[in-house]
Amino acid sequence: MKMRQGFVSNSSSSSFIIMGNEQQPIAPKHKISPYEKSLTIPDDLGGETQFGWQVQKYSTFEDRLNWAALGATYKAIKREAGRYSDYYYKRLKPNKKWLNMLIKVLKKDFCLTHVDIRFNDDNMNDVGYIDHQSGPADRPENFEFFKNEDSLRQWLYASGSQILCGNDNDDVYWNIKGELKKNED
């Protein structure tokens, strides 16, 4: 994926269109109190944490932050033979480069001293996921905003950055303009 307006990234299970179209977007400082020096993702800000088969557009800063944090903390592992899907995603070993970049950008842009990313509840059950064929192992282009800090800021802060979820079992699809259209089969 290139960070350009109107880019489409598709897969058979879930489709994601990620667009960043502003020059030098600004961090939404109002989202975090200037008196707070730590941030726990996703608990402190909320936002969507389950990006799956639903036909839905996600465009808030919180949603994009959760998408990036999930991508940085996920690793694909093979399912057992005979399952209907070849891969599923479980947080096993984070992508340290992406994780460190995300934490560094958030600390700098929001004057934080600590950032914690926890997509599990008190019983260690997962509360966040990216559906198979859309995560970093199968669709690394969905995470090319991690190529450098400027691209990451573009993804996080540009109001035009969006995640468009869907699947090939629905009678609707997202077009290149981010509009929901009905299949005419």
Image (spheres, rainbow, N blue to C red):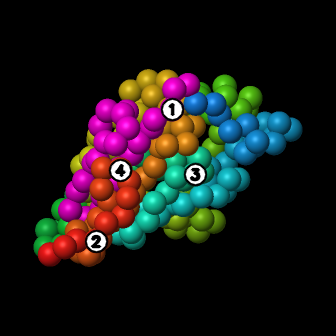
Nearer to the camera, 25 or 142: 25
Estimate the spatial distance between the alpha carbons at disc 2 and disc 1, rounded to whole Å.
29 Å
- Distance Cα–Cα, label 3 vs label 2: 25 Å
Is residue 141 visible to the viewer in this orientation of the structure?
yes
**Quick one: which residue is furthest to the right in this view?**
35
For the point 73% across and 37% down, the residue is: 29
Q: Which of the pair 47/17 is nearer the observer?
A: 17
Q: Which residues are magenta?
A: 1-24
Q: Amino acid at mark 4?
A: Lys
Q: Which residue is mark 4?
A: 177
Residue closest to the eye, 70 or 21: 21
Q: Is residue 123 left or right of residue 32?
A: left
Q: CA distance from mark 2 to mark 4?
A: 14 Å
User: Which badge, 2 or 4, comes first in the chain's sequence?
Assistant: 4
Upstream in sequence: badge 2 or badge 1: 1
Q: Badge 2: few (under 14), some or many (20 or more) residues near its Cα, within 10 Å?
A: few
Q: Residue at x 55, y 25 (%)?
A: 24
Q: Label 3, label 1: how many angstroms apart (C-alpha)?
A: 15 Å
- The amino acid beneath tag 3 is Thr
Q: Secondary structure at mark 1?
A: loop
Quarter of the figure with the C terminus = bottom left
Q: Which residue is mark 2?
A: 182
Find disc 1 in the rendering and name its residue: 22
Q: Characterize the local packing of mark 4: few (<14), some (14-19) or many (20 or more) Cα atoms within 10 angstroms.
A: few
Name the mark on residue 60: 3
* Residue 175 counted in the magenta span: no
Crowdedness near tag 3: few (<14), some (14–19) or many (≥20) residues, C-alpha within 10 Å: some
Q: Nearer the viewer, residue 109 or 87?
A: 109
Q: Amino acid at mark 1?
A: Glu
Mark 4 or mark 3, which has the lower sequence index?
A: 3
